[in-house]
Amino acid sequence: MRRAFVALWLFIGAPALAVPQAPVAQAVAEPKAGEVVTPVSPESSAKVASPEPGAKAASEFPPEVERALDALVRADLKQGPTAGLSVGVMRGGQRWMRGYGFRDLAKKLPATVRTTYRMASITKSFTAVAVMQLAQAGKLDLDADIHTLVPEYPAKQWPVTVRQLLGHLGGVPTYDSPSAGNNTKSVSSREAIALFADRPLVAEPGTRYVYTTWGFNLLGAAVETASGQSYREYLRDHVFGPANMTHADLDEVRTRDAHHAVGYRVQGTALKPSRFLDVTSRFAGGGTRATVEDLLGFARAMLDDTLVTRETMGRMQASMVTRDGRITDYGMGFATYPLRGHYIVAHAGGQPETTTLLVVLPAEDTAIALATNVEDEAKRLRRLSVRLMETVLDEGAPARSGHLTDPVDAVEYEGLGRMASYGLAYHDWATRGPGRLPPEQDLAGAFTKVTALFDRAAIARDPRGAMERIRGAHEPRAESLFIRVGAHMAATVERVLGTERLRTYRTQGAAGFFADYLAACESVKCPEAERFNPGLRDDVARFVAGWKRAEVPALRRSRLDDAKDPERLWPALKEAAARAPTVRPDYTEELLSLADRAKRKPEVRMRWLERATQLHPESMDAHLAQAVGLLEADREAEAIPHVREAFETPEGTLVLSPAGFIRRLLDTRSPKVARGLLRAAVTLHPDAPELWDALAKRERALGDPGAAKVAQGRAKKARQVRAAQEARAPRTPEVVAPAGSTPAPDKVPHGSTSPTVPVDPEASPEP
């Protein structure tokens, strides 16, 4: 089963704005007649520059790798209107950088590796490094109340520490209205703090993750206090300079040069100029600009311990934890989590004029930098980052999750996948990166508790509860069971079968990792407690056998959506499913990708959507995508049952909560689709006032005041019911996680192919 925070719907019709064509780079074949071309200028490809004194020399990737990287970017950019995109990939001493499209459509100026973009919230990572440098130097106390460093920020009902602000645990609010983030005038650091200084905390510090740009503005002011320099001066002297970020600076009109990208937003099927936003008001939380080469320089400095010590960087990359023991998937200035067995350290950014993404894999000495001058392109950049990662680290082989028709099998396989991903990622991070594993005290007891989580009878009695326990088994409140046991398994496999063996599980399914561990255990005579129980061992063997029976030879090392003729492979997929009806590889993401590519051909698009639910009827993502396709076609009555089907999957019962639906609306550009999803959501959660409120807003925007009034009335009634219930039995309200925070359950599946790097909450034109 696939786990994805981001709903697989982002629908753009045929572009009304034709992208003008720039000359194609010589290394790329001329297009065929009628072929859509992603413009690339001769100056777009990066040349390997001479290194700075003391810096590592960079070299090029092998030509076949560069061709593969270029091809996948070009293929992706054919989907929907695009302006400019700059891409950088680094592994060890190898670099590949290229610009695509235009930084200025009107003037036909190409995007290159020299093009500067607004970094938006990637700025938070720069700020966090600055704070930790000052903490290392003894000039700043991480546990100091921020009020003592920033006197213009009044003392609150609880102390708010620097450490808490670094992890978005300080309770400082984020933009609470469109006007709060819609600044058009240049302001000073002090004036930026004054914009929110009087607002109360929204949670007691340490109890809730609340993504906040305002909180990082406080950190920027603390940098100024502790260093005696302006924020800009400090970054240039201590971050940008040492990291060879030649073109990085604060994003002010006076610092922009001729290479800065003009910003665009998607309106309907066309690109329109971005609205103006002055970002000095979010200086330390989203106020810088840079090139993708600068981002790779920052990543290189992180990996080489140039900016802070290795120990400090390890602390920054470790996820912070709420007071009740929940992992936030955010460290100090970086989102950080496992994905397919890789340990990911990342940050995304989104504002008017820009979408950006930096992904660092510290255990694999790898980084990926992406920047575009089109807003709200987080989904595209996430998808691209995963494909680039596959190409550089996994030789292009796709990672697939498993499709299981039996609900008990599905929950059990979810646990296998999560433990494989956490185990492989944390083992790598602790042995080849700067990380540390949780302390080990009772390994045998941990294995016993993990085995109990996989008990089939217990899962059958309460599938939802079992899924919740499995999805929280990596957290400190659950003794970090999946991390401790999974990392021990990875270490055992590496000791017996070698390091290279660990690289294969990202593309072979989680059961293969368990099977190899059990075989390795046999050879080194592991204690019986570390071999799980016979029932689980039998299930692992059954899963491995089913996977092998259902493999399509032509797709073992390639993706369905990369095939020249995917139609030709459809009969083979159906035959494979018939050979292994209960356990098989999951092709949902690839099928939905084919549907996205066919958006200009509605009948073809719908055919691939229908095939996704036909091949994987238990897939939440497949049903949601088909629902959205039907909504686009004005077939709402047919769409709602698919939303119900999605909700009734083991994943859907947890993920499609009221808060889950609200999160998914962030990726839904079409007001009509958003309304249809909300109409379905309120049938599933009729007592959720937040859903009725959102529906009322959509109905009003689409010109149906009568329906809006009805929805508003239902929202009022739902609030009254909730208030009465809370008065009788006080409870902790459901927290709507901000887009910058993806709950851990949606990120770590071993075989998931859905891009899951966090989205920046500022990505929407309206904060």
Image (tube, rainbow, N blue to C red):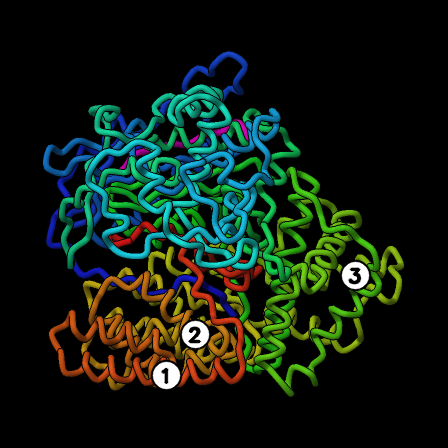
Q: Nearer the viewer, residue 613 or 224?
A: 224
What separation in Å lies between label 1 and label 2 (alpha carbons)?
A: 23 Å
Q: Residue at x 26, y 24 (%)?
A: 255
Mark 3 / mark 1, whichever is N-terminal: 3
Element marked by disc 2:
loop
Q: Residue at x 17, y 31 (%)?
A: 109
Name the mark nearer the viewer: 1 or 2. Answer: 1
**In the visual, does 613 lie left or right of 633?**
right
Q: Say which amino acid is labelled 1.
A: Gln
Q: Position of residue 671 (x, y in %)?
A: 21, 68
Q: Which residue is more in the foreground, 353 or 238? A: 238
Q: Main secondary structure of the magenta part?
A: strand
Asked if the stretch drawn in magenta spans residue 95, the answer is yes
Which quadrant of the structure image shows residue 599?
bottom left
Reading the image, the residue beneath label 3 is 519
Q: What residue is at 31 percent from the left and 50 percent from the top?
A: 763
Left or right for 420, reference 198: right
How far apart marks 3 and 1 lie (CA) works out to: 58 Å
Amino acid type at mark 3: Ala
What is the x, y in percent for residue 431? 70, 41
Q: What segment is highlighted magenta in the picture?
A: 92-100
Q: Residues within 10 Å of mark 2 (few under 14, many from 20)?
A: many
Q: Is residue 756 visible?
A: yes
Query: Is 431 on the left-hand or right-hand side of 551?
Result: right
The residue that label 2 is drawn on is: 656
